[in-house]
Amino acid sequence: IYAIGDVHGRLDLLDAMLARLRADLAARPHPRPLLVMLGDYVDRGPSSRGVLDRLIGIEASDLPSVFLLGNHDSYIEAYLSDPEWYDRTYHWLHSAMGGGATLASYGVRDAHERDPRATHDAFAAAFPAEHAAFLDRCRLWHRIGGYVFVHAGIRPGVPMEAQNRDDLIWIREPFLSSRRDFGFKVVHGHTIVPRVEHHPNRIAVDTGAVRSGKLSCLLLEGAEVALLEASGPVPWPEGSGLGEPAPGGGLRSTRELVLKPFGLKDVKIRGFQVVWQETGGYEGRVDVPAIRVPVKSMLAGQAEPDFRTFAKPPEGDAEGFFSRHGPLPFVVTNWPLIIGLIVLGALLVGVGVGVAIKRWLAGREVDEGPFEDPRPAHVIAYERIERLQGEDLFSQGQAKQYYFRLSEIVRDYMGRRYGFDALEMTTEQIRAALQTEVLSVEAGVAVREFLEETDLVKFADFAPADDGGDTVLRMARGLIELTRAADVAPAAAPAPEGGA
């Protein structure tokens, strides 16, 4: 049995894996081979249409195969049946979910810039009936001997015949952390792992093809488990992918703590607990006590003094080590302390001067209240957006900060435009407040899509779109243009009574 993980539009990786699979069958013929595809064939990658074409071709070939339905595959059916409800609930066309890439593979591009109904109609016309029929034939789960194949996982304690469809294509917890013996081993995708993980009760095969460039294929022959690599099958016994082999058996997983001391002082690390699941299925844990590392010397071994290294002297040679290298003088090794004292002194002087000036001006000041910029809200917003673009946060690796800042600018704009404190409100509160305003359908959609786009990055830890911020910036500008106050020309002077 060959089980291939989530493809997500990576036709190149799928073709390479299929070539590897056929080479293995040629080298080691089997009377009853079976290919099981674990779902999520579409979205994110560039060739969703090509992947479905290839799978339909496999289905018609001489290679017996089983195709399972993934949550991303189910998006298509739901989007075609009711795009407005589905897109609002599951954000299929959000860049992180990848629906736009699927539409683009069928020739429907720039979905965010089109009218939602027009986008839906164009995709419905472009989506072949044979692709819809193929997805309709995909199964939710398949059992062979001691293995159950499913896209996401199962609900522990529920018989397979009673499993919920949403669980089979969506579940993570409590499935992933369950140590229950299901009576079979579950082979699944959906949850990305750095490499295939072989647990006592499940095997995780989704290795993130889109971002990692690695599509994995599990090879099951009786009780033997292997990975299909370019060189052929590589044994992958229980416990593989969960850590490194340790001397005497078992697994060892290593974590490193990097210390960067900036002075001759003790470095203290709080105690912590390490918890893991043993290959036998039971939980192991160890308490690591607090760690205290005395820093005795800092060596000027690098050009930049702020990046000096702390090194342990050779055994039995501490005195000779320090005498040969010698600790740096206090004035050099404690630059952070010295700079801190200088800054603190400057702050204290500044505070004193400020207090004196304030007292001198007391009685002369008129409380005019906080400054309110009289310009239109959209003018202020565009000015702030221009300054944000000038900071070029994307090229500095601060894409998420860019989303935070742009979200703050747009929320401030909506607060100024409609008279509520949007910076202190949740997305739902903002949308509720806007119910009292007269917004066009396009404006309502623009507000919703922008808030959802930024919220997914800010709160759901979705990766920002890799486009330099162009997509979310275009959404912000579109929102402002659709909701800005109309420019009002000065009113004409009234005509004198009695006519000209």
Image: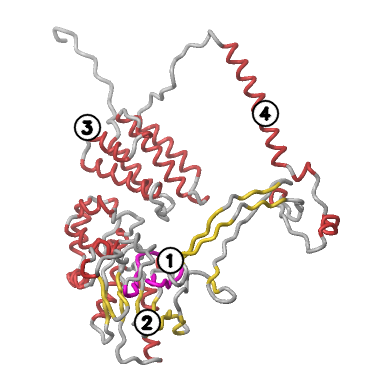
Q: CA distance from mark 3 to mark 1?
A: 46 Å
Q: CA distance from mark 4 to mark 3?
A: 51 Å
Percent from the top left, x then y, of residue 500?
A: 16, 10
Q: Which residue lies under the disc numbered 2?
A: 220
Q: Quadrant of residue 228?
A: bottom left
Callout 4 amino acid:
Ala
1 vs 4, front mark: 1
Q: CA distance from mark 2 to mark 1?
A: 19 Å
**Is residue 256 visible to the viewer in this orientation of the structure?**
yes
Which of the two labelled residues, at mark 1 and mark 4, occupies the earlier sequence position? 1
Q: Which residue lies under the disc numbered 1?
A: 193
Q: Which residue lies under the disc numbered 4?
A: 346
Callout 1 amino acid:
Val
Percent from the top left, x then y, of residue 301?
A: 75, 56
Farthest-out residue, left: 498
The answer to whether 309 appears left or right of 427 in the picture is: right
Which of the two labelled residues, at mark 2 and mark 1, occupies the earlier sequence position? 1
Q: Residues within 10 Å of mark 1 (few under 14, many from 20)?
A: some
Callout 3 amino acid:
Thr
Q: Quadrant of residue 73?
A: bottom left
Which of the two labelled residues, at mark 2 and mark 3, occupies the earlier sequence position? 2
Bounds of the magenta span?
Answer: 183-205
**Nearer to the camera, 484 or 427:** 427
Q: Secondary structure at mark 2?
A: strand
User: Which quarter shows the N terminus?
Assistant: bottom left
**Nearer to the camera, 242 or 368:** 242
Q: Residue at x 46, y 64 (%)?
A: 283
The answer to whether 317 appears left or right of 470 in the picture is: right
